[in-house]
Image: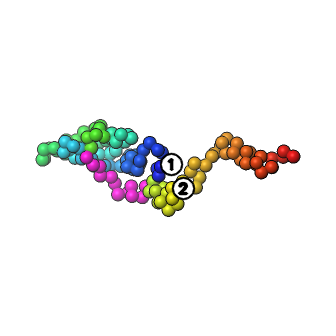
Amino acid sequence: MSVVGNNRVGIPIVLLHDAEGAVVTVETKRGELIRGLLFEAEDMMNLYLKKAVVHGPKPGSKRVVEQIYIRGTEILFIVLPEMLKHAPMFNRIKHWRKHGGAPPEGVGAAVGQAAAILRKASERRRGGFGGG
């Protein structure tokens, strides 16, 4: 199990998803600086920003766009808000480092019908469950 609980995505992608709904700044390979509300982030780092201001690549050029879609391969870096340093994901990472990769309590535990089946099986092994 990975630190973030999903083997397909890593820490930067989870952090990017946590930033949805916040104002971010993105620099592209073309030299554009785009600042806007991060509406959606995809696992391939494609970003959908709303109410964005696009600066560059020429000095002094600036335009306001209602929405913009930025392909992940065109992104050089992303400036995220300071509030994300308190994201819940970092608590999972601290726990993971402290306990040597063990998942936090309750994560990965069976719930619902699966929990009932496991409980009955363990009772049978101990000789309980009214079997005589």
Which structural element holds mark 2?
A: loop
Q: Look at label 1 and name its amino acid.
A: Met
10 Å neighbourhood of mark 1: few (<14), some, or many (≥20)? few
Residue at image mark 1: 1
* Residue 51 is at least partly visible in this image: yes
Q: Are marks 2 and 1 in contact (CB under 8 Å)?
A: no
Residue 28: x and y in percent read 23, 44
* Numbered range of the magenta stretch: 76-87
Q: Which residue is mark 2?
A: 102
Neighbour tally class for label 2: few under 14, some 14-19, many 20 plus, Cα within 10 Å:
few
Residues 64 and 86: in front is 86
Residue 50: x and y in percent read: 31, 41
Q: Disc 2 marks which amino acid?
A: Ala
Location of residue 100 in the rendering, given as x and y in whole percent from the top left corner: 51, 59
Q: CA distance from mark 2 to mark 1?
A: 9 Å
- Residue 122 in magenta? no
Sequence-first tag of 2 and 1: 1
Instruction: Name the residue furthest right.
Output: 132
